[in-house]
Each structure stands twice: as structure tokens, then as C-alpha cells.
Image (cartoon, rainbow, N blue to C red):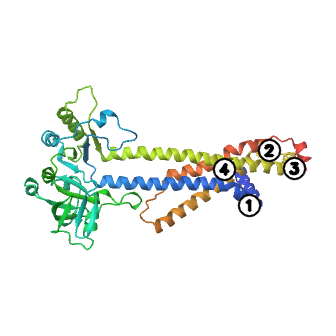
Amino acid sequence: MKARLVAALENVRLACETLMLNRFRSFLTALGIFIGVLLVVAVASVLNGFRQTVVDQVEQFGTNNVYIYRLPFVQLGPMSREMRNRKPLRLADAEAIRRHCPSVELCSPDIQVPTFLRRAIHGREEIDSPRLRGVFPDNVEVANRVVAEGRFFTDQENEHRIPVVVLGWAAAEALFPNGGAVGKEILVDGRKYTVVGTLEKRKEGPFGGQNEEDTLFLAPYWTMRRFYPGEDDHFLAARSVPGELPQAIDEITQILRRQRRVRWDDDNNFEIGTADTLIASFDDIVFAVLGVMFLLSTVGFMVGGVGVMNIMLVSVKERTREIGLRKAVGARRRDILLQFLVEAMVLCAIGGLAGLVVAEGLLGLVGLVLPQLAADTPMWARVFAFAGSASVGLFFGLWPAWKAASLDPVEALRWE
């Protein structure tokens, strides 16, 4: 074992010396591997940071929440006809969940009011297409909202259909850049509302993008039904009793199947999501992108590997006489094979290591310049990139090494 270790270290030393004798050629050969590793680490880091931002946003609403809607929360590809024709969830569905689901603490329905091409106005400040939503007062608890100024509206204001509104952080900043929103009146879609509160800023979206929750105009549910009586497409958010999330999901599923008269052998005509399922749905998208990245990186490694094989074949030809001398003094085929194979692997490993170092440095620099760009290099990306670079040397260096080991010593000594 000790002899093998000494031999391996000697091969590495010889490989480094040979590469140093041809620095520029070695640099150009390793450049393809370097670029491949750099791209793998950079893309994986950005995707991992993007995913973590989404996870933080989803978990911000609470890990015990259950979300119910008639359409999928994440849809890849066109919707089926069955999905498009699903009937909306009703207020009665939320009331049935409240009454018959013991594992559910709160259930808060809301309606999204279409305000496309409408405006929210205060003085000279305007917002195009404001996101106006009618909710119940308990929405502040279910969605883990934090009031920054003023208060949330009350049950009495909801029941009496009072035109009051709570502004998300970005909506308040846009209409009241100097502050002081509470108590002021605004126009939304031509209707007058009194601002009773503003919300704290939510975590930013991926790449520093604005969180859509910060753009909301939250008004009492029954006020919205008064102004928009035709809107009846509900989104339900429920919070389970701590530790009873699976039971809550089962209870909600059974109640809604009964409410919506779903046959026992038919699939649900509604969607139920939790923080975990939403993250899993997003992971499907991330993994698809990673699959494409791995495919492209494999192509890049192959291109770099062809360059490595070409240079190693040239090196074998240039050192034919050296190979003959080594064989003449007792070197075995295995020794020659390992020498050239180790040289190819060292060359690729140096390119891979340089790619890792430069990628980490660039990501750190970008993080200082653009702190809103979330980028976090996962360990698996480092391992994959470095192992991939070393594997390229092993795979593409095998043929040149075998060719060197197969040279006839007499013919090699005659080589000029």
C-alpha cells in the first residue's frame, strides 16, 4: 500500500512538472474545463438562491396553512378542459370547513377583484391595475400579516360593508411616498375608501423583485361583494391545529368533495396545497432547469475532453523516445499507462479547481455589488463540478495513455 501511494505521488509530481514545461498549452487545454465548471457552479448557485427565496416567501405565510383553490397553484403546460370548467369555490365551502373540520383553527375565504386597466389614486399619485382583494378580518392571522401603522379592519366594518382598506407596503409607498397614509381617503376603481392601516414589508422576491403581497389593497369581504356582486370565485386559506396538518388536509378534502358533490370514483375538482407541496411544485421547475444545465455542462465537458485527448496524443508523440527509454530501464506498461492517465487527470483537475475558485470569487463580488441577487453555492454543485472535471481527464485521457503504454520500446527508441 505504501509503495502504491509513493508511486501515485511520484506520478502526480511528474505530471505537474510536465505541465509546467508547457504552461501556455496546458492553460489553453484546461480552459474548456475551467469554463464548464464555472458555468455549472454559477447556474447552480443562482438557482439555489432563487429556490431559497421562494421557500422563505412561502414559509412566511406559515407552515401550518392549507390553501384551497379550484385551479392548480403551479401549472406546467396547458390546462385540461376539465380544469378550465371547474366551478368556483363558494363562501359556503369555507363555512362548512369551519363547522366540520376539528383540525382547522381558522378558514379565511377571499375574492380577487378584477381591476385591470383601473387605477388607485391619491392626489397626484396613481397605481395602474391595483390588486384589490376582499378578505375577512381573520386573514391577518391566517396569512401572518403584520400591521405597521394603524390597524386591520374589524368584523363590524366587514358586516356593515364599510369602505375601508389596508394597504400593502409597496402600495402605501406608491400612494403616500411621504407617509401618513392612515386616515386618508383614496380612490380605487372610482370608489372612495378610507385607509385604516398599512402592512409591514414582506421578504423580497427572487433577484430582489417586489413581493406581490406588498402591492395588495385589502378591503372587507362584504364591502367587495357590495361593490362587485358578480364576483364569486373564492380562494380559501386555512390554518390547522399545530401538529395536525395531515388530519386537516384529510378533513378539508372530505368536506369539499361532499360540498361539491364529487363522485367517489372521480378525482378532486379542486386543488389543496401546503407550504411543502408548493415548494415541491417549484422544485419540479428547478430540477427541470438543472437537468438542462447538466446536459449543457456535459456537452461543455465533452468539448473540453476532446481538447484534452488531442493534446495528450500530441504529448505522447513528442515523448515517444522518453517512453522507450523508460521501458528499456524496466518500466511496465501499467507504469506508463498510469503516468499519462494521471497527467490528464491532473490537467483537468487544475482546470476544475480554478473554475471553482473563480466562480466563488465572482459570486462573492456580485453579492457585494448586487446584494438583492440571492446566490448560494450548494455543496453538491461543487462536488459535481470538480468530480466532473476529474472524470473528463480519466475518460478522455485513457486512449492516449493506452497508446503510450502500447508502444514498442525498440521502435520508440528509434523515434526521432
Judged from this view, the residue extending furthest toward the top is 265
Q: Amino acid at mark 2?
A: Ala
Q: Secondary structure at mark 1?
A: helix
Label 3 close to label 2 by CB (< 8 Å): no
For this view, does 166 lie left or right of residue 346? left
Q: Which mark is on residue 24?
A: 1
Count all numbered tags in the image, as a single digit.
Answer: 4
Q: Amino acid at mark 3?
A: Arg
N-terminal of the pair, mark 3 or mark 2, is 3
Q: Secondary structure at mark 3?
A: helix
N-terminal of the pair, mark 4 or mark 3, is 4
Looking at the image, residue 397 lies above or below residue 176: above
Label 3 close to label 1 by CB (< 8 Å): no
Which residue in the structure is indicated by mark 3? 321
Which-is-in-front pick, marks 1 and 2? 1
User: Which picture quadrant has residue 156?
Assistant: bottom left
Which residue in the structure is indicated by mark 2? 404
N-terminal of the pair, mark 1 or mark 2, is 1
Q: Secondary structure at mark 4?
A: helix
Q: CA distance from mark 4 to mark 1?
A: 16 Å
N-terminal of the pair, mark 4 or mark 1, is 1
Q: From the top left corner, tell me how far across and down residue 295 is, in percent.
A: 56, 44
Q: CA distance from mark 4 to mark 3?
A: 28 Å
Is residue 152 visible in the rendered image? The answer is no
N-terminal of the pair, mark 3 or mark 1, is 1
Q: Amino acid at mark 1?
A: Phe
- The one nearer the camera, 258 or 82, is 82
Residue at x-position 67% and y-position 55%: 30
